[in-house]
Image (tube, rainbow, N blue to C red):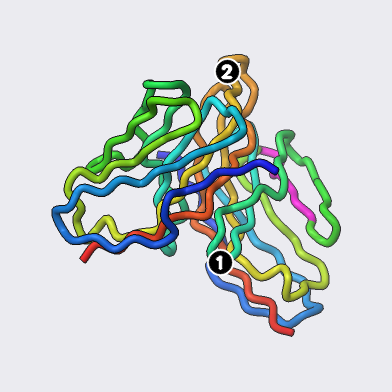
Amino acid sequence: TQLLEQSPQFLSIQEGENLTVYCNSSSVFSSLQWYRQEPGEGPVLLVTVVTGGEVKKLKRLTFQFGDARKDSSLHITAAQPGDTGLYLCAGASSGTYKYIFGTGTRLKVLA
Amino acid sequence: DVKVTQSSRYLVKRTGEKVFLECVQDMDHENMFWYRQDPGLGLRLIYFSYDVKMKEKGDIPEGYSVSREKKERFSLILESASTNQTSMYLCASSLWSGSSGRSPHEQFFGPGTRLTVL
């Protein structure tokens, strides 16, 4: 069974701090996605990475796919209260419909 | 603006009741999914449908069934609700990536239905 473990599970930081969230698996994925979910809403896609070693930036968020395509990280620079939410990674294999979701990291940024 | 809507945001049912959760998407997507979300467990796939009247079991189908009579509508049915089915239920849809070897497309999620079974 494919599993995606995220760490940390919870994170509470002050506005302006930097943070990194990790998503790890023993399985290889052809693509990996990061979603953010706010209270009372469904997850919303932030980014998709498909190439080993790929780095993508979305304003203050930097996403990296591991060289072996088994892990990924999300780095937030100068966190803001608007970054508060549940961050989920999801891995998929090519030719399949199925996404494997990680266990989630709940981030709270205090003003 | 793309939309996935779910029939209820909150639902309270009693043990043994039959429960219907409805999901509608307006994006003409082939794929539709039902997940349940529990703290510390992430999202777990219950059922998936890639076409009208087609369905496949996900990771945790026991105690659930689904129906897809129209492309835009995907229903989740709890035949006899139990307390361990208390959870957040999320519906999602996506384009079909086919068998071309491409990775699956982005999923669009509804706002979720929080179901409590007493």
> What distance separates the C-alpha of mark 1 from that of mark 2?
33 Å
Q: Nearer the viewer, residue A34 or B64?
A: B64
Is residue A10 in view from this perspective?
Answer: yes
Q: Position of residue A78 (x, y in %)?
A: 82, 72
Q: Position of residue B33 (x, y in %)?
A: 46, 37
The stretch in magenta equals A62-68
Indicate the amino acid at tag 1.
Answer: Pro
Write down the residue under mark 2: B98
Q: Residue at x 57, y 64 (%)?
A: A105
Q: Residue at x 47, y 24 (%)?
A: B50
Is residue A27 in view from this perspective?
Answer: no
Q: Nearer the viewer, residue A100 or A42?
A: A42
Figure quadrant of the C terminus of chain A: bottom right
Residue A105 against residue B73 in the figure, above or below: below
Write down the residue under mark 1: A39
Location of residue B57 (image quadrant): top left
Residue A20 against residue A15 in the figure, above or below: above
Q: Nearer the viewer, residue B30 or B99?
A: B30
Figure quadrant of the N terminus of chain A: top left
Indicate the amino acid at tag 2.
Answer: Gly
* Badge 2: residue crowd in 10 Å (few <14, some 14–19, many ≥20): some
Chain under callout 1: A
Residue B58 within the magenta-colored segment of the rendering: no
- Number of marks: 2
Residue A65 within the magenta-colored segment of the rendering: yes
Q: Residue at x 43, y 49 (%)?
A: B7
Chain under callout 2: B
